[in-house]
Image (tube, grey):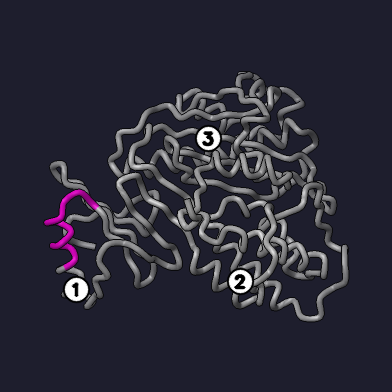
Amino acid sequence: MSKDYKQSLSDPSLFIKNYKGSFTALLIYVDDLVLAGNDLEEITTIKSFLNQKFKIKDLGYLKFFLGLEISRSHHGIHLCQRKYALDLLNDTGLLASKPTTSPMQRGTKLQQDSGTVMDDPTSYRQLVGQLIYLTNTRPDISYAVQQLSQFMSKPTSTHHEAAIRVLRYIKSCPGLGLFYPSTSHLQLKAFCDSDWATCPDTRKSVTCYTIFLGDSLISWKSKKQPTVSKSSSEAEYRAMATTVCEIQWLTYLLQDFNLQFHTPALLYCDSQSARHIAANTSFHERTKHIELDCHIVREKLQQKLFHLLPVSSSQQLADVLTKPLDPLPFSNFISKLGLKDIYTPA
């Protein structure tokens, strides 16, 4: 791309121009793009240039993009997928269903052979695929969808019932989404956690993290680890290593946006043994099998990319991505993640 725009090394779909206090960012997805910046003259210029090359259609201020709905006020920006969620409920015939207060019942452990195998798994696969896209603005269903996505090859009636419960939960709050306040303390804060040997079929653990820029949730993940961990400390440490890599990537991305953010980042972990492994400068036989993760975490810790801090389990904001919770603690956790429903009557 010309006009002095440079492709970001952190995100190939992002093009940026930074010149004498003027900053413009162009984000491209196939034939759709978002243009933002602090220089209206430069924005008008680049729109004219793109129109000459591709005959673009200017839709004005960003309100709807790839199923994402953006609402703006002087308080901040709200990002949700309300229409997408309602269309999903309508397509599955659950628009008038009875809502639930949580996506999964506490203690639920989905297994590969539980229930009766579905004759046609296509509908299940399509449903889970749609739910995966909904997690772009709904971290509250990330754990449940991660669990459902493990059974795409051979889904059963039990898995389908669990997916229906997720839809009934979405029915209770289709407009729930992420709120980004207009004023915030620009420092990365991360919470990493793991649920050891949680998979009853493979005994693999779950890695999860939530990363905030100030009070705004900007990255999260709930994913089954690729290997079996011999101890809860090992599982926690693998989750920590994954989170550190994400912090590094976000640091590069914020630098591309020319943001003056506070360093180092803060990484909260509720595992004392995992924190001790990170602080230990020597390797021994109990850590050799996770030596690569140890090198990653310790190297970035010594480079002062982040500070490693303790946190109590009750304040561990990543806990909601590791296991099903009762409705009350679940509701408390998702409110701390910055999730709000602007369509709920005041």
Residue kind at label 1, given as amino acid type: Asn
Q: Nearer the viewer, residue 162 or 344?
A: 344
Most frequent secondary structure within the magenta stretch: helix
Quarter-of-image position of residue 152: bottom right
Q: Secondary structure at mark 1?
A: helix
x and y percent of residue 144 in the render? 69, 55
**How many residues crowd mark 2 within 10 Å: few (<14), some (14–19), many (20+)?**
many
| Residue that label 1 marks | 51
The CA span between labels 3 and 2 is 33 Å
| Residue that label 3 marks | 190
First to last magenta residue range: 37-47
Residue kind at label 2, given as amino acid type: Leu
Q: Are marks 2 and 1 in contact (CB under 8 Å)?
A: no
Residue kind at label 3, given as amino acid type: Ala
Q: Quadrant of the N terminus?
A: bottom left
The CA span between labels 1 and 3 is 41 Å
Q: Secondary structure at mark 2?
A: helix
Residue 171 left/right relative to 251:
right
x and y percent of residue 111 in the render? 83, 58
Q: Are marks 3 and 2 in contact (CB under 8 Å)?
A: no
